Amino acid sequence: RELKVELGERSYPIYIGEGILEQIGSFFAKHHIGKASPLLIVTDEYVAKHHLAIVETKLREEGYTVASYIVASGEKSKSLSVLEKVVAAALEAGLDRKSTVIALGGGVVGDLAGFVAASYMRGVRFVQVPTTILAHDSSVGGKVAVNHPMAKNIIGAFHQPEMVVYDTATLRTLPDREVRAGLSEMIKHGLIWDADFTAWMEENASKLISLDQEALQYGLYMGCKVKSIVVSQDEKENDLRAILNLGHTIGHALEAVSGYNELLHGEAISIGMVGSAKLALRLGYPEHIYTVTKRILQAYGLPTRLSQHLNTDDIMSAMLHDKKFMEGNMVFIVPTEIGKVEINKNISSAWVREIVEELKQEA
Ligand code: NAD
Ligand code: ZN
């Protein structure tokens, strides 16, 4: 499958298929990525173990000079100190202005390598090779960043890739919990944009969880498509792009409060999406939004209730620090029907507090 992200001069393709890493060399050649300048692959320790050799081999067979840099797995690699090490590797490998940086991995590697590409020599080309389901979200849209100890994703840029090469065979080595957490973002893409796709997500839960290749390709295609439509209409997040944050206001606070180790991102936004559906109920939108949202998330074995031990005051103050709160109002993405959301800038913090409490009582 092939999809194009429409961004004028910065438009780029997303290739999705089983085993397409075999053809990565020809994709590079087709995109006029020159062979005179070296390439740098950035990946993490787990992904390297399973999937680095094939990428290096196929690119070398095509005639490219390839260096690789392997970071530790996990969010801690999205830091300035790791960035410095990747830049050192780029300098040692002789990367120049015409070089390309390749992100081989999940969202962590994508964000880190993308920011290296955005900043190295004021910007070089960049290719995304996602290996997690969550990365269907992070590899599309051009947001790249590293974290600061005081805030997530706070040092970053917009830097669109040349292309995205999504080999669904790589997902077979992904741990089951990561599979489900990634599918949470796919469900989100349905809920914000497409009722039919949402229904398909519910019907195909067991296929997706078991990595049925046909189902995965369609799901990733649709997820990337929703994301790319939204990003094409609002690349720099002036308004519409905010709808991608469904479930994220509460979700980010839960990640922060639980110290980024108890809940995976997709699990935190699963609970956040239930919270948004509860807000919809309070605003008088139809009951079935809540029922359907919860039913789908449960079909994927995703969490829909909040652990009692997380403190409500801590969650509330984490939300107030979130960069999405502008002018003191609480901004929430609220579903108004399945496949549609609104950006509501007038949500009272008292309601949000009550909903956080209710999320601890959920069945
Ligand atoms: P991740 O990159 O840490 O990958 C999850 C885990 O799976 C890691 O332990 C990794 O080593 C392992 N892994 C990855 N691919 C594997 C494979 N094929 N086989 C075996 N193990 C594999 O995390 P993620 O969930 O992909 O991404 C989360 C990150 O994405 C966060 O930092 C988040 O901020 C970022 N993100 C960015 C955007 C954006 O628009 N830029 C959007 C959403 C999320
Ligand atoms: Zn997310």
Image: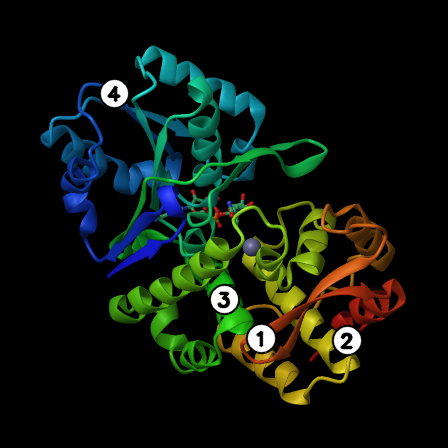
Q: Amino acid at mark 3?
A: His
As drawn, is 218 to the left or to the right of 113? left
Q: Amino acid at mark 4?
A: Pro
Q: Kindly identify which residue carries mark 3.
A: 189
Q: Answer with mark 2 or mark 4, whichever residue precedes in sequence.
A: 4
Asked whether the beta carbons under mark 3 and mark 2 sit within 8 Å of each other, the answer is: no
Q: Is residue 35 visible?
A: yes
Q: Dot 3 lies on which element? A: helix
Percent x, y of residue 126: 36, 34
Q: Residue at x 72, y 33 (%)?
A: 150
Q: Kindly identify which residue carries mark 4.
A: 38
Q: If the image is split into quadrants, where does the C terminus sit?
A: bottom right
Along the line of sight, the residue nearer the viewer: 149 or 310 = 149
Asked whether the beta carbons under mark 3 and mark 4 sit within 8 Å of each other, the answer is: no
Q: Answer with mark 1 or mark 4, whichever residue precedes in sequence.
A: 4
Q: Answer with mark 3 or mark 4, whichever residue precedes in sequence.
A: 4
Q: Is residue 211 visible?
A: no
Q: Dot 4 lies on which element? A: loop
Q: Answer with mark 3 or mark 2, whichever residue precedes in sequence.
A: 3
Q: Residue at x 40, y 80 (%)?
A: 200
Q: CA distance from mark 3 to mark 1?
A: 10 Å
Q: Amino acid at mark 2?
A: Gln
